[in-house]
Image: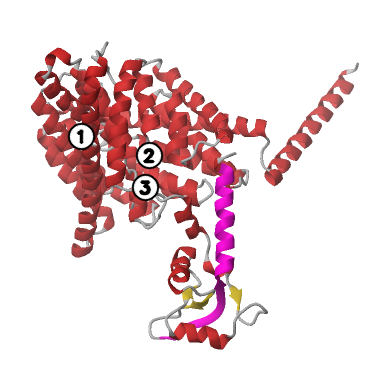
């Protein structure tokens, strides 16, 4: 065969391949990806989210090395003890100023996005999150954690992963189910890459973000989670996130009641942490509004408060690897564990309430380890004959506080189990976790994230029967005045004069209580022009239409969760 014919054949094959790819892309956009395509996309998203988590972690470490001059960021607070006091104080102030400017420019409300926004995106926005605000929040959280803020990196990493999946979902025009599944894939990979824990990463995405365990979502999420773990292990090998004791001893059944008590204590500590954050946020809002403080200055003030605390207690700086590892290996005294725990709660409340960015996962691990260590030192001191190692209590406390804060008892227990590989340790942690989550979930709206959303008026904690109402706008369901099935205009005005009407811009969340209270079959729909001006009547919302739309949404959610 001549070179000319060979060249001609190759060109034809390339053209055929291009046509096939274009057809496949068009088909995927029109009908959604096939199972193989979807799994391939899940793998690619897992790789991208894993690298995002890796680069975010290394960027924080690099910034900490630059501003504090340390070679080992895992011993940051020991190094900070030798720095001039004014430098330890000024670094968080400068970091807060930078964060304030970033959030002021890149977010509409100067608030860093985190896990709660990802949960909201999964439930209410077809698996999508804000992209510009999300990228700005990631940058702000990077500065916060690198320059003295006291929060965690897992929350920002989860939202970064969600931004990646949102971009992909928009590109392929994914529907709600596909968008949520891709979101779960991204989150699983990010968590796995952060903790080197593929099983826990997959279950975290299902338990916390999607809030269901549908079979159809498990395989792609598991694929993405493994991909994220591989990215972590390429860089860090099998290195554990925290230094753990070589062996933990449990006097088995005799000692289990102590872990029940530890779980109750951890539930109270987790609740105190969450309420401290909410109280700090409310107080900061009040002061900001009262004194008319510019919103970009709020993180700077928070940084100043953190800097003052860090002069004497640099243990609060950053994620807290060194202090958490010291607690897990039993290197702290009783008074140190108690004081560091209280100061960390205060520092986290200032950081998040001051809107500096970051998450609550790593801080809850540190607070839990300190709580467990303090409990273990007391328990083993009182009952030395029937007690195992006090470091086991630190490990159980680490899991119990984190599980209560996140509302994730299954995935948190598995994270600890994957860190240790010891089934007896896993049993002790499971006992403590079950008690802490049972208690804390009754003192808040199930978890820190769901309580955050509840405070914003997003009612996800009660389940689909509560939040699905907010998805249906009255204007889309209303019937126009003058239609064959519509009541007369005179009848509508009669109801309006009695105060029974609804704004067309609201949702069924506002309409259904009116139906229940009045027991009428329709509500006049109006446009509220302005204060002192009469409303404009243009339609009616019928109870049967509202119930039909609501039931359809419930059926779709049920079908997705059981598929």
Residue at 42 percent of width and 41 percent of height: 159
Left of 299 or right of it: where is 535? Answer: right
Question: Label for residue 450?
Answer: 3
Above or below 251: residue 295: below
Name, please, the residue furthest toward the right.
1
Residue 42 image offset from top left, x and y in percent: 57, 32
Q: Give the mark, 1 or 3, whose residue is nearer the N terminus.
A: 1
Q: Quadrant of residue 334?
A: top left
Camera-nearest label, 2 or 3: 3
Residue 397 image offset from top left, x and y in percent: 24, 28
Secondary structure character of the magenta stretch overall? helix
Residue 36 image offset from top left, x and y in percent: 66, 30
**How far is disc 2 from disc 1 in space, using C-alphas?**
28 Å
Q: Quadrant of residue 428?
A: top left
Left of 85 or right of it: where is 16? Answer: right
Q: Which stretch is magenta?
A: 533-560
Question: Label for residue 65?
Answer: none
Query: Which residue is denoted by mark 1 in the rendering?
Result: 265
Q: Give the mark, 2 or 3, whose residue is nearer the N terminus.
A: 2
């Amino acid at each position: 065969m001549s070179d000319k014919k060979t060249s001609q054949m190759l060109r034809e094959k390339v053209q055929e391949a291009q046509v096939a790819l274009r057809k496949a892309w068009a088909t995927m956009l029109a009908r959604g990806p096939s199972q193989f395509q979807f799994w391939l996309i899940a793998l690619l998203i897992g790789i991208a989210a894993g690298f995002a988590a890796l680069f975010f972690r290394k960027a924080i470490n690099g910034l900490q090395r630059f501003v504090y001059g340390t070679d080992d960021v895992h011993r940051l607070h020991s190094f900070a003890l030798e720095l001039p006091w004014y430098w330890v104080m000024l670094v968080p102030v400068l970091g807060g100023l930078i964060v304030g400017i970033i959030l002021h420019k890149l977010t509409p409300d100067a608030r860093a996005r985190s896990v709660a926004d990802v949960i909201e995106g999964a439930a209410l926005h077809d698996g999508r999150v804000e992209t510009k605000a999300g990228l700005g929040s990631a940058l702000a959280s990077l500065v916060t954690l690198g320059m003295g803020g006291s929060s965690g990196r897992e929350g920002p990493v989860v939202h970064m992963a969600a931004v990646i999946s949102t971009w992909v979902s928009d590109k392929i025009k994914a529907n709600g189910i596909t968008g949520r599944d891709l979101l779960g894939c991204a989150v699983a990979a990010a968590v796995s890459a952060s903790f080197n824990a593929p099983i826990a990463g997959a279950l975290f995405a299902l338990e916390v973000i999607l809030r269901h365990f549908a079979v159809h979502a498990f395989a792609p999420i598991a694929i993405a989670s493994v991909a994220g773990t591989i990215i972590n292990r390429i860089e860090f090998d099998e290195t554990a996130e925290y230094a753990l004791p070589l062996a933990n001893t449990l006097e088995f059944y005799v000692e289990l009641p102590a872990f029940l008590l530890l779980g109750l204590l951890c539930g109270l500590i987790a609740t105190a942490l969450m309420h401290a954050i909410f109280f700090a946020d409310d107080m900061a809002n009040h002061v900001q509004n009262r004194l008319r403080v510019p919103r970009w200055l709020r993180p700077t003030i928070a940084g100043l408060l953190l800097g003052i605390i860090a002069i004497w207690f640099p243990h609060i700086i950053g994620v807290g690897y060194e202090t958490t590892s010291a607690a897990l290996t039993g290197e702290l005294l009783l008074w140190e564990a108690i004081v560091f725990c209280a100061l960390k709660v205060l520092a986290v409340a200032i950081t998040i309430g001051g809107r500096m960015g970051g998450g609550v996962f790593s801080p809850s691990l540190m607070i839990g380890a300190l709580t467990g260590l303090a409990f273990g030192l007391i328990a083993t001191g009182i009952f030395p004959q029937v007690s195992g190692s006090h470091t086991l209590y630190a490990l159980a406390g680490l899991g119990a506080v984190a599980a209560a804060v996140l509302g994730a008892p299954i995935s948190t227990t598995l994270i600890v189990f994957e860190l240790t590989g010891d089934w007896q340790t896993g049993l002790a942690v499971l006992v403590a976790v079950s008690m802490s989550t049972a208690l804390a979930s009754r003192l808040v709206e199930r978890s820190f994230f769901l309580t955050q959303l509840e405070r914003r008026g997003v009612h996800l904690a009660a389940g689909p029967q509560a939040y699905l109402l907010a998805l249906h706008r009255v204007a889309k369901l209303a019937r126009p005045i003058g239609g064959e099935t519509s009541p007369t205009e005179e009848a509508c005005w009669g109801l309006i004069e009695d105060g029974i009407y609804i704004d067309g811009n609201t949702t069924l969340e506002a309409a259904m209580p009116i139906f229940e209270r009045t027991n009428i079959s329709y509500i006049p729909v109006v446009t509220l022009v302005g204060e002192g001006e009469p409303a404009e009547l243009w339609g009616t919302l019928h109870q049967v239409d509202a119930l039909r739309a609501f039931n359809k949404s419930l059926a779709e959610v049920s079908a997705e969760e059981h598929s």
